[in-house]
Image (cartoon, helix red, strand yellow):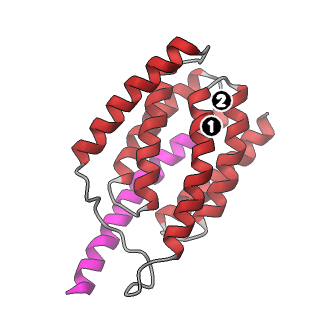
């Protein structure tokens, strides 16, 4: 499994770096990464993460489509703020993680069901916001990466732990880069 994890790690770094740069090729690179991680997380009995990555496959396709088809007045999909306030997204994450964690702890032999459930729900929110090119996505990615580093280290997934350390750095850079792009868009629009 180590070589699969290594390949997935490389594609993950490429994909997130391209997201930071707002480049459309982030989506096919991400598609390779998430597909490989379905197998990796199945083997590690991180079932919530496995299910998350199955859903990611569809979200990668959606994001690729959405970024490829901006409205008529924009050549590129602009970075925006979410219409839904951050506190509502956070509430969705906490309630969703509590429900999913309970289900995984009660009905499966999942390793670390509670933090794994948090990673899943927060990642789904973050991925949705990324596909919509909302700045707030990076705030969720930062929190997800911190929790994921702990979970993957405990499960001896060292390539994946390293990947999420890199993801954490890229998430901070992504937030700063997207905020700068959003400010430049506002100046251009004036």
Coordinates of residue 22 in the picture (x, y in percent): 48, 69
Identity of the residue drawn at 27% across and 36% down = 91
Residue 80 is left or right of residue 121, and the answer is left
Which residue is more in the foreground, 100 or 112?
100
Q: Is 34 inside the magenta-drawn segment? A: no
Q: Quadrant of residue 47?
A: top right
Say which quadrant the C terminus sits in. Answer: bottom left
Q: Secondary structure at mark 2?
A: loop
Q: How many marks?
A: 2
Residue 145 against residue 12 in the figure, above or below: above
Residue found at the far left of this picture: 190
Mark 2 Cα-neighbour bin, 10 Å: few <14, some 14–19, many ≥20: some
Disc 1 is placed on an element classified as helix
Circles 2 and 1 in contact, beta carbons < 8 Å: yes
Task: Say which quadrant the N terminus sits in.
Answer: top right
Between 175 and 93, which is closer to the camera in this rendering?
93
Q: Residues within 10 Å of mark 1 (few under 14, many from 20)?
A: many
Is 36 situated above or below 11? above
Report whether residue 153 is seen. Answer: yes
Q: Magenta residues, as a range?
A: 163-190
State the image coordinates of residue 92 (x, y, percent, origin top left): 32, 38
- Label for residue 160? 1
Q: Which mark is residue 157?
A: 2
The answer to which image quadrant residue 102 occupies is top left
């Amino acid at each position: 499994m180590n070589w699969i994890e290594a390949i997935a790690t490389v594609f993950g770094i490429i994909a997130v770096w391209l997201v930071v740069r707002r480049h459309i090729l982030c989506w096919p690179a991400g598609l390779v990464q998430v597909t490989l991680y379905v197998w990796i997380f199945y083997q590690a009995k991180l079932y919530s993460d496995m299910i998350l990555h199955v859903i990611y496959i569809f979200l990668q396709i959606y994001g690729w489509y959405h970024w490829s088809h901006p409205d008529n007045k924009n050549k590129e999909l602009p970075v925006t703020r979410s219409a839904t306030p951050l506190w509502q997204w956070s509430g969705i994450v906490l309630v969703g993680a509590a429900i999913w964690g309970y289900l995984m702890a009660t009905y499966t032999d999942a390793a670390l069901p509670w933090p794994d459930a948090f990673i899943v729900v927060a990642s789904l929110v973050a991925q949705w916001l990324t596909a919509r090119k909302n700045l707030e996505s990076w705030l969720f990615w930062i929190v997800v990466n911190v929790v994921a580093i702990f979970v993957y280290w405990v499960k001896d997934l060292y390539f994946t732990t390293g990947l999420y350390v890199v993801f954490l750095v890229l998430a901070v850079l992504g937030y700063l880069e997207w905020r700068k792009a959003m400010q430049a868009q506002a100046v251009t629009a004036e």
